[in-house]
Image (tube, grey):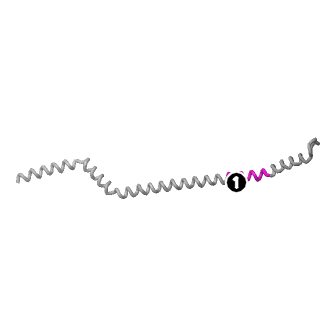
Amino acid sequence: MAYPTPVNDMITDSVTQANVKVLGDAPAMAMGALYQSLAHSTGILYENAVGAQQQLAIAAQASTNQGVIQIYSIDTMAGAVATSKIATSDTSSTMLSLLTALKATKGVS
């Protein structure tokens, strides 16, 4: 003890022992807090990994659906392209004039 005081020696000894106990427990409490923080961070890491995996599964399913839709619509798309080419060309007017010429020559013979 540094200075003699009018306080009972048993009281000062108990306060000193309590302070020593707090100082002795500090490293264990710090490690406990560190382990708890690491466990929480690892939990968040796994939550994010599961969320990313779910989003990738949804994207894979959507791309598979789009591929199947394209496979099933090949004939329809080919017909649509052919129809649009015929509609934009002058084939119909050529066919009409040819039909008119055939009808005209049929009546002449």
Q: Residue 104: image x %, image y %?
A: 9, 50
Q: Which one is nearer the viewer's eye here, 8 or 85?
A: 8
Give left or right: position of 94 versus 103: right
Give left or right: position of 72 versus 16: left
As helix, strand or loop, the secondary structure at mark 1 comes to: helix
Q: Is residue 75 above or below residue 10?
A: below
Q: Residue 15: image x %, image y %?
A: 86, 46
Type of residue at label 1? Tyr
Q: Is residue 101 one of those drawn in magenta?
A: no
Dominant secondary structure (helix, strand or loop) of the stretch shown in magenta: helix
Q: Which residues are magenta?
A: 25-37
Q: Which one is nearer the viewer's eye here, 4 or 75?
A: 4
Query: Residue at coordinates 24% horizontally, 48% vertically from top-left?
Result: 89
Q: Residue 109: image x %, image y %?
A: 5, 54
Q: Residue 48: image x %, image y %?
A: 57, 52
Task: Report the quarter where the N terminus lies.
Answer: top right
Q: Which residue is mark 1?
A: 35
Query: Residue at coordinates 44% horizontally, 54% vertically from top-left?
Result: 62
